[in-house]
Image (tube, rainbow, N blue to C red):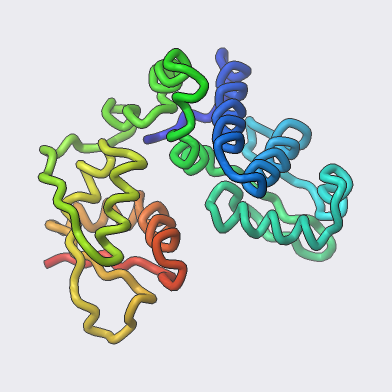
Amino acid sequence: MQVTRPVGREAAAKKYDILSALMAHGLAGEPQLQRLVLRLMSLITSRYNWQRDELTVGQREIARLWCVDERTVKRDMARLRAMGWVVVKRQGARGRVSVLGLDLQRMLLDTRPAWPNIGEDYVARMTDRGMGPEAAADGSANVVPFRRHDIAIQDGLWGAVRARLLAEDPVMFDAWFAPLVETADEAGQGAAVLHLSAPSRFHATYVRTHLLARLEMAARRCDPSVHSVRIDTP
């Protein structure tokens, strides 16, 4: 899935749709998640620059907006970064606050299971606008449509990661993740590094360049001890 940033003629409608996805995801979760999503939505609606993908606000100002202390702000912002929803674009220095951005693709992947709660028309609209899981099937996503591989249930970490990636985006999974095979850890790094083998040099290069961050995020969500994924060729 490749997300089109909400700018241009339909910018306002796309923004509402992204916020609706967050709302549905929060309402379907437990109270702690609901609170976290609400706090993020307050930052988006009040301080986020959609066109530049920038959120520049200090912890003290966030604490005032959320009606909490700065310690709570630090904890919740760390959680949002760990989820991959908030990214640091420029680290603050010399008294300046950090410039943050939003990974809209990661948000939409995580919130997708709650979209049907809004309605079938919403799911169809998100897909038509290139914001749904089927968006990767068109040419704009630059995905080579490889033939679908048989999806076998696998045990262990890679099996859990495969299942998560398949649920997030079946088209992307078929094209790039399904052909990857877990290999033995020859360096003795254990679970800290997930070693995978790609079927060709081109395949490995593409995954490293465009999809490694998504792979590592999925691996860490399945096993927090994983800090990186290594892609090799046979």
- Viewer-nearest residue: 107 or 145: 107
Point out residue 93 in the picture as x, y percentages from the top left corner.
76, 64
**Vertical comparison of 219 with 165: above or below:** below
User: In which quadrant of the rendered view does residue 78 lie?
Assistant: bottom right
In this view, which residue lies farthest toward the front? 30
The residue at the far bottom in this view is: 188
Name the quadrant of the N terminus: top left
Quarter-of-image position of residue 41: top right
The residue lying at 89 percent from left, 47 percent from top is 64
Closer-to-camera residue (20/88): 20
Looking at the image, which residue is at 80% across and 62% down?
71
Taking the image as shown, residue 151 lies to the left or right of residue 57, namely: left
Quadrant in which the C terminus appears: bottom left
The residue depicted at 59 percent of the width and 43 percent of the height is 102
Residue 27 falls left or right of residue 183: right
Horizontal side of 103 relative to 140 (left or right) equals: right
- Residue 194 image point, x, y percent: 31, 69
Tell me the quarter of the picture where residue 180 sits: bottom left
From the top left corner, tell me how far across and down residue 172 is, in percent. 28, 40
Residue at 29 percent of width and 86 percent of height? 188
